[in-house]
Image (spheres, rainbow, N blue to C red):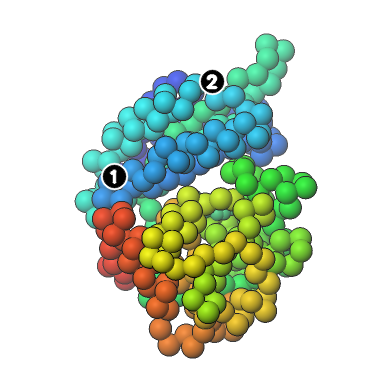
Amino acid sequence: MESDRVAYVNGKIIQESLASISIHDRGFLQGYSVFDTTRTFKHRIFKLEEHLNRFYNSLKYARLDPGMPRTEMAQITMEVLETNLPLIDDDDDYWVTQRVSRGVSGPDGEAPTVIVETVPLPFKARAKYYRDGIPVVVPSVRRTPPEVLSPRAKIQNYANLVQAEFEVKDKNPDGWPILLDMNGNLCEGPGSNFFIVKDGVVVTPREQFVLAGISRSTTIELAQELGIETKEADIDLYDAYTADEAFVTSTSFCICPVSSINGSNIGDSVMVPGPLTSRLLDAYSGLVGIDISGQYLSRL
Ligand code: PLP
């Protein structure tokens, strides 16, 4: 069925398998492009407006002009998604992504490459993390610091995150990287923000050093609604090793418990997820109208 999906590419909605972009595209030549990704829950798109706001902020930071207002980007996104939804089962869902690259630069100026696409979420491959928790491994590769390129913008160049992933997978094939920032504090991994729970307080790194994940802000809002204290603060390895609970947030995971860091169990590790992580995950499931871990666990 995969080849039947459509994508929007530079003004046209076409079959994904027929889509092509120039070999001179600067997204490919220089890694110069920006993207954003949301997902569906029960086939309904999640927080599209928030994702597009972040997308247009990333574009502004990167000095990229998509050539269309966000209302048009939203309309194209919905058209691609609605065309592709009949291709997946009722209990499957999509990642939904917009991408803009610098495109081709030539004597006639430059035009961005604009893509909107959907990909089925990898429930089966990641289901084990809801059963066992995520074994986090901290690689030697550090996250790009704001002085080099702001991690707050969702820039397509994931070279350092992918390098980290290779290093971690060599140590533990199931391992999930969470990188240190240049100050030696834990910051984020490929596509995921990091949280710890200590003495009843939910703590996550400051926004200056990480992408402000939409699932991160959703989790903070849910915690506040539940009367749980939240804090943005530096988290070093001591904080992580001695945390009561830890979890990651991302568009695909929403909230997923962490079982260990560099082989050191989190909390008493008898219960994954821990009690506060559980409450937050339940609240997230309530918000999106789906049993989040159940959707993953059903694939085991
Ligand atoms: N951190 C990075 C580097 C990311 O690329 C992402 C998302 O892909 C996240 C965090 C999580 O953001 P969100 O919750 O919006 O998916």
User: Residue 289, image x and y in percent?
Assistant: 26, 55
Please tell me whether residue 176 is drawn above or below residue 13 in the rendered image. Answer: below
Inspect this view and state whether residue 260 appears.
Answer: no
Q: How many marks?
A: 2
Residue 8 lies in quadrant: top left
Q: Which residue is mark 1?
A: 44
Judge left or right: residue 220 versus residue 94. right
Q: Nearer the viewer, residue 271 or 16?
A: 271
Q: Which residue is mark 2?
A: 67
Inspect this view and state whether residue 35 appears.
Answer: yes
Number of residues whose C-alpha sits closer than 10 Å to that of mark 2, classed few (under 14), some (14–19) or many (20 or more)? few
Q: Residue at x 46, y 41 (%)?
A: 51
Residue 131 lies in quadrant: bottom left
Q: Helix or strand or loop: what does disc 1 sit on? A: strand
User: Mark 2: is the Cβ under 8 angstroms from ligand 1?
Assistant: no
Q: Quadrant of the C terminus?
A: bottom left
Q: Helix or strand or loop: what does disc 2 sit on? A: loop
Q: Nearer the viewer, residue 240 or 192?
A: 240
Are the two marked residues, 2 and 1, in contact with CB atoms closer than 8 angstroms?
A: no
